[in-house]
Image: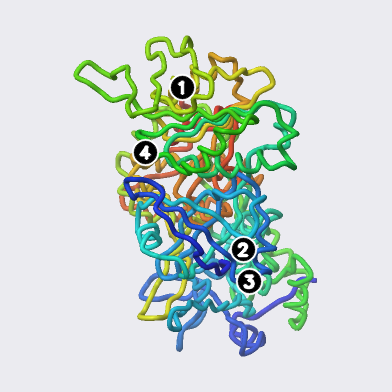
Amino acid sequence: MPYPVRIEKAEVATTDKMLKTFDLVFLDKEDEDAFQYEPGQFAELSLLGKGESPIGIASSPTEKGFLRFTVNKVGLVTQTLHQMKAGDTMGVRGPMGNWYPYEKMKGGNIVIVGGGFAFTTLRAFIVWLLDPSHRGDYGDITVVYGARNPGLLLYGDELDEWAKRDDIKIYRCIDWKFGPEGPIEEASAEGWVPINMKAPGETSIPAGQSTFTAFVPQMVEAAAPGSENSWAIVCGPPIMIKFTLPVLTKLGFKPDRIVNSLENRMKCGIGKCGRCNIGPKYICKDGPVFTLAELENLPKEY
Amino acid sequence: MAKLLEKSKVDEFLKSFGEDALVLCPVEREGIVFFDVPSEGESITFDFANTKNAPKAAFFPQSECMYKYGRKGDVFEMTDTGYDDKPRVLFGVRPCDAKSFDILDRLFVNKEFVDPYYQAKRNSSTVFALGCSEPCRTCFCTSVDCGPFGTDGADVIMTDLGEKLLLEPLNEKGEKAIASLPDAPEGEIKKKETIASEAEGKIASKVDIEGIPEKLWEIFDHPIWEEVAERCLGCGACTYLCPTCHCFDIQDEVMKSDGKRVRNWDSCMFPLFTLHGSGHNPRTKQGERWRQRLQHKFNYYVENFGCTACVGCGRCIVNCPVNIDIREILGKVKNAEKVAVEEGK
């Protein structure tokens, strides 16, 4: 049965109003203590009378007292959730799934590549990494995060704060505008410096600049994070992943060092109802985090 | 110690399990034999090859309430409705269906997560398997690690000796269940041995599944799946009647301020099964869905749980409205040529 929780905060997260961030607080301290989770896991948000939705946990376990979820308005449950406000109660079932393999990544550099609203569990991981008790265990942290326009980037305030830090490199990017002959090589919005569109790898990045105009794969190429002793985590729409993977490969990342978080239609979340599988693996309990090497061994059923 | 039970005394024996026990057995209703709780006036029948429905519903009902909830003003309250552990006696389960319990146990009750709804019913049940003296032509149990007198998943195995039944316990639970019955004389036990060995020989249908899991990996992208599913209507009859199919859906049912969350059988043959909220569906074609069913039963389940999720009961063959025969398809799979994996997607 789900744990009862109260909505503490409900804020629209993007300018198109399709995403809302919810901070949830447990009604029972015992439940809060029982809900021990790791960055990368998800939970089923339970609306009694409507149903459940599996949503990635956007908060890090280092942030005590609440759970943060950023939810896209897609169907019956999420639509109802969007209409709810602070003070309303609902349920949370979880935590479920596996998590980003931070143990294996210790001592390495980390490159985080996100697109659109797939950034939710990536936020969880970044906050976790930046926590003083963990930061020392890892090398350079590079974040590339892109969306169609500035209003669709999540957690803008936090990204601004992180951009000011010297222990993490942030590259935010927005899509090129399109003219009759293709993408136009100029800033799509004020302050969003265009990279070298024809040869992204040759872009010279002005010091301290963290906002650019580029497609995510090009931004990764421009940022050129080193692949030596590095891990890449890639989360985003299929088209972004499709074009980012070759860039990472070009930069020297091997499939067992590229990590993805997948999604599929889910119900039970614990590998019994048979719905979310890719081959013999259930995305709910054997995933959602998989390395590219693991995915290459599974049928291409997605 | 083997026991004997006169068929005329079966009702009395079943009543001896008490008022509280739920008894399920083969009953005839308008010409079709079902495995169910006998209603008023119904009694057990021994005149059948196999029941229309699989007995899995005893532990995994078609629709099951998981918990209830209600609204009091602005606050929701959830009510734990507990787990049904009423003792059940399943009397007259064919060995293939009994084996299905063993197969389902590996999924529902394992080290990772235990399904308490299934487990409660399973633990409080006693399974009396009834050996098949006359298997039918669509049975292929011997090809999938079972047999007409197989003992997996059962507590007692019975043999039909005409006017009487021979009951042999398979474990402690079985021994206790039949302790009150008279011992069976040596002669009757010998009769059973003859019937059992003859029955094995009567299974006419053989399917060679040696190497099928590896083969299924090799031909994942083969055009054979489109061909196989061309006739398939996606009606789901195979999944609903199959003793080992276990996919389910969870839905909320609400009446005014009260509701419950229920678990219902679902089928991978339906397009909605894997439809994403975004509208994307990883399995848009019936061929892909059919592939999932076969891969799941003969490949993934083997990898995950060490056994094939098929007991050779033949229900899918008998009931498919377009005569798709899983044995024929397994044969095609066996002979299909390996296909190079598609690059990228």
Q: Residue at x 51, y 39 (%)?
A: A262
Residue A28: mark: 3
Q: Residue B293 vs residue A39: left or right? A: left
Q: Looking at the rendering, in which quadrant would you find the C terminus of chain A?
A: top left
**What residue is disc 1 on?**
A219
Chain of the residue on which disc 2 is drawn: B
Residue identified by numbered label 4: B287
Chain letter for the residue marked with disc 1 in the picture: A
Q: Using the image, name the chain to which the residue with label 3 belongs.
A: A
Marks 4 and 3: which is nearer the front? 3
Disc 1 and disc 3: Cα gap in Å?
44 Å
The first of marks 1 and 3 along the sequence is 3
Looking at numbered disc 2 in the image, what kind of residue is underneath it?
Asp
Q: Are marks 3 and 2 on the same chain?
A: no
Mark earlier in primary sequence (2, 4): 2
- Mark 2: which secondary structure? loop
Estimate the x, y position of residue B246 in percent, counting from the top left.
52, 57
Mark 4 to mark 3: distance in Å? Answer: 48 Å
- Within 10 Å of disc 1 (Cα), the crowding (few <14, some 14-19, many 20+) is many
Give, as a three-letter code, the residue at label 4. Gly
Numbered disc 4: what chain?
B
Separation of residues labelled 1 and 2 (CA atoms): 46 Å
Q: CA distance from mark 1 to mark 4?
A: 40 Å
> Which numbered disc covers residue B115?
2
In this view of the protein, can residue A297 be seen by the observer?
A: no
At horizontal 36% and vertical 38% (from top left) the residue drawn is B287
User: Which circle, 2 or 4, is nearer the viewer?
Assistant: 2
Does residue B14 appear in the picture of this structure? yes
Asked where in the image residue A84 lies, by quadrant, the reply is bottom left
Percent position (x, y) of residue B271? 35, 48
